[in-house]
Image (tube, helix red, strand yellow):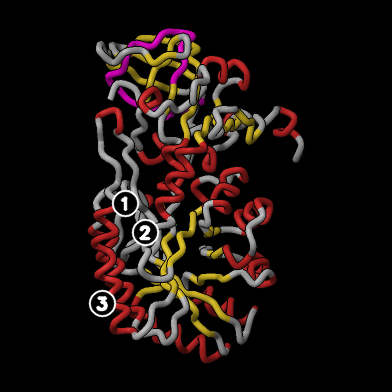
Amino acid sequence: MDSYINHVDFFKGNNPEDIAREYGTPVYVYNEDVIRAHMKSVAQVITKYPYTANYSVKANTNIHILKMALEEGVNCDAMSEGEIRMLEAAGFPYDRIFFVPNNVSREEMQYAIDRNIMTSCDSLSQLEQYGELNPGGKCAVRINPGVGAGHHEKVVTGGKKTKFGISESDIDEIFKICDKYNLTIAGINQHIGSLFMEPDPYLDAVTNLLRIAKRFDNLEFIDFGGGYGIPYHKLDDQPEYDMESFKKRLEPIIDSFVADYGKAPLFKSEPGRYCVAEGSVILGRVHATKDNSGHHFIGTDIGMNVLVRPSMYDSWHDIEILRDGKPVSRDSLTEQNVCGNICESGDLLCKDRPLPKAIKGDLVCVLDTGAYGYSMCSTYNSRPRPAEVLVKSDGSLKLIRKRETYEDLLKLM
Ligand SMILES: Cc1ncc(COP(=O)(O)O)c(C=O)c1O
């Protein structure tokens, strides 16, 4: 594919150069239709049994995006009190929030308990803490299914080497703590990791979790976790995650569980990336170019503070070079290093990647930045965080988060 943004008319007729001039760079630009389409798709992963998709808001907590989830009938999972507060601000009722924290303080857990938000405990010690805070209460436990999957070691969250979840061998201890505090386990959940394009590890983990589920009586819900991938190599025509064939393979696994268990609890999944990743690009400006010992550098304002995934996980994001608001043809490519303005040699969006030759003044358009983009931004090097703009379904533009200012950086001191 020569240009993704042209292929899907990402800016809906708006000139990206005008967006960059009006809102400044770097700027996150979202497409409402793309996000809503993905949310609609995850809401249909299971249709035969009771099911809800929980959008995992760590991927992106912009309140305008959370409101889209609310409208599309998607529930949410939150990892922290801060994420719960974002959901409150977006208007989410507490019974549509699932709190899936890790190593939280008594105060943070109490915040959820006070609001009657279903909470999952991801260790025996957190379950004990839950029992102390809410004796006689109802909660969930996060099971470590013993298998993991993901695009990088740092995002694999199941398996023996990770800090997440309670091992199957500790299930008897769960029951002992429940007896001690008169707790009811309403649900079990898992999350094996992030960004898989082949469903096999997920389906294995589902099979395993359903086997484990039979040890719990009267579960109200079983949550299989998130992790569905998106094609980060779309300019090389990488296909989408095959949701339809995944659904066909998932259904018989659930059928067989329901037959054995004697009833169908509510099933849940927790996709984050899949809902929002493809619905955003970042526009940044080329401010300098240079050659260093045969390596060509394109210096932009998209530093690792704006998008950390390439430096943190060596993640690939496709890049389009825009001149006068139009993608430069990919017929002729030269190897280039696109870098940011942060004082780190790891501040690179790509290394020696064949791209159309960029010149000073061009825009760099980084694709698939809606998930773990803005939500992982920082103010490193005292750079204010960027603005976020939404291209609405009717083609109009809406500023959905202002650019941080230098005054904002100073105001807590
Ligand atoms: C518990 C839990 N659920 C869901 C997710 C969402 O994963 P993804 O964005 O890959 O779908 C994560 C991501 O880290 C997670 O930790």
Q: Position of residue 311 (x, y in %)?
A: 41, 35
Q: Position of residue 354 (x, y in %)?
A: 27, 19
Sequence-first tag of 3 and 1: 1
> Which quadrant is home to the C terminus?
top right
Sequence-first tag of 1 and 2: 2
The structure residue drawn at horizontal position 52% and vertical position 34%, both measured from the top left corner, is 30
- Three-letter code, disc 2: Val
Question: In terms of image quadrants, where is residue 377?
Answer: top right
The structure residue drawn at horizontal position 51% and vertical position 70%, both measured from the top left corner, is 120
Q: Which residue is mark 1?
A: 150
Q: Which residue is mark 2?
A: 45
Residue 281 falls left or right of residue 238: right
Q: Which residue is mark 3?
A: 256
Q: CA distance from mark 3 to mark 1?
A: 27 Å
Q: Nearer the viewer, mark 3 or mark 1?
A: 3
On the question of residue 174 being in view, the answer is yes
> Which quadrant is home to the N terminus?
top left
Question: In terms of image quadrants, where is residue 329?
Answer: top left
Instruction: Provide the residue span drawn in magenta.
Output: 342-364
Sequence-first tag of 3 and 2: 2
